[in-house]
Amino acid sequence: MNAGTLLGTARVFNHHIHVAYYWLAFVDAVLFFGACYLASYFYFLPEPQLLPGHLETLPARAATFTVMTSAALFSMGLYQPRLREGPNGILLRTLGAFAMMTLAMAFLFYFLPALHLWRGVFVYAGTMSLVACLTTRSLFTRTVELDAFKRRVLVLGSGDTAKQIIDRMRRKSDRRGFRVHGFLRFSGEETSVESGKVFTLDRPLSDYVRDNDIQQLVVALDDRREFLPGDELMRCRTMGVDVVDILDFFEQEAGKILVNHAQPEWFIFSQGFRNGNLYAIFKRAFDIGAAFFLLMLAWPFMLATVLAIWWEDGIGAPVIFRQRRVGLGGKIFEVKKFRSMTVDAEGDGKARWATPGDARVTRVGAVIRKLRIDELPQITNVLAGDMAFVGPRPERPEFVRELAEEIPFFDKRHCVKPGITGWAQLNYPYGASVNDARCKLEFDLYYVKNQSLFLDFLILLQTAEVILFGKGAR
């Protein structure tokens, strides 16, 4: 395997994953599993005669510990290539993940005592796993930044379309899987890319690609009909070089679809956008199961929220806020939330975006919005079938009419049920403008195109990061 392909992407159940980070997860899982055995040997050193009996039942317990620890790390975003934290941030997230794992294991042991790890073994295993996790992550972080392990990408074009890679993939975290070798300018093409890597060729493209070990060509031409070198691209494909459109490139590397550069035919002919009856049945079963599970966990917080609202505004004050939203196929429904604003927040009947430091937000409202507790009544919307657990956030009809006029393909987000959480919520902060809505739509369309239960599960896991770190709250 070429070293430059180690940080490439692969499709798993339609979702684009960065292979290296899943290898990291696999290595971590092996270390966590092994830590349970090593911890057992240490714990039973004073009484070695008890060890064989303990080892007979250890595999299931070690597997449970491994799954819980790996899931906690996933939920804290520690297997996401676009994570921008420094060493202190990584340490904080790792400690948070192990604290979350400890609570989850305690909860599991209470209901399934057969999976109980001895307290001493658990302490040893947790400590060893924490040290191993920090060590492997330190080594991995240093390795992942090496150019030798990244794909060499040549961009065909130097105009506004190609400039999207410069403008929207500026950070190291955006380019973990690739490095741009350069931008190929064609004679007569207007150049917008301001970089020393812009150049022209005086020899066949296939020869240059072979001599410079280019592994991927990204077609980012403003005018393909005039400049696209079709024959040379065919030669490159037969040489084993990956050739992708800039839309597909952003989809696989950034998990978004560039709506301003997409054409209707791309939606028609590209893979994805499938929603069969069997998937719909499994999706509905998944939503109902997740809704009841969350309700079982969240009811104490919901009760506390009701009491807090009454404490601030008086007993009998409205607790639930109902608002018209647009759902599947453009159908209007009423979304339910805990009231986080004053009763007369929109007394004049005019719809408004929430803004930073919005004066309409109550003291209790500021807390429950930060922790996303205000969203919990939407469990009833999920059970009623108006919403799914995972999907694009539902917008108000007033905003939908405005946004549909400004943003191409905005109505495509209504091809699936809206959700309590979604791909856009993980990748973009709270939106309060047309431009924010456009950016969020790029992530929403990725979800609509690549939806699967696998992606739903990953989104639910990572929603913990949104809640704990207040991403997107306003």
Image: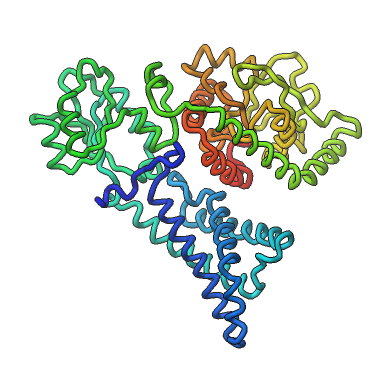
Q: Is residue 390 placed above or below 123 in the rendered structure?
A: above
Display colour scheme: rainbow
Where residue 194 appears, as percent x and y from the top left, is 27, 30
Where residue 25 appears, as percent x and y from the top left, is 46, 55
Question: Which of 60/367 is in front?
Answer: 60
Look at 27% across and 48% down and name the residue there: 4
Looking at the image, residue 107 sits to the left or right of residue 220; the answer is right
Look at 34% across and 32% down and name the residue there: 165
Q: Return the residue found at the far left.
A: 203
Question: Which of 132/66 is in front?
Answer: 66
Q: Is residue 297 placed above or below 228 in the rendered structure?
A: below
Look at 53% across and 33% down and name the residue there: 424
Say whether residue 261 is visible: no
Question: Which of 21/82 is in front?
Answer: 21
Q: Is residue 218 placed above or below 129 in the rendered structure?
A: above
Where residue 86 appears, as percent x and y from the top left, is 46, 53
Where residue 131 appears, as percent x and y from the top left, is 50, 67
**Location of residue 102 (image quadrant):** bottom right
Say whether residue 248 is visible: yes
Question: Which of 142/49 is in front?
Answer: 49
Q: Return the residue found at the far front.
A: 278
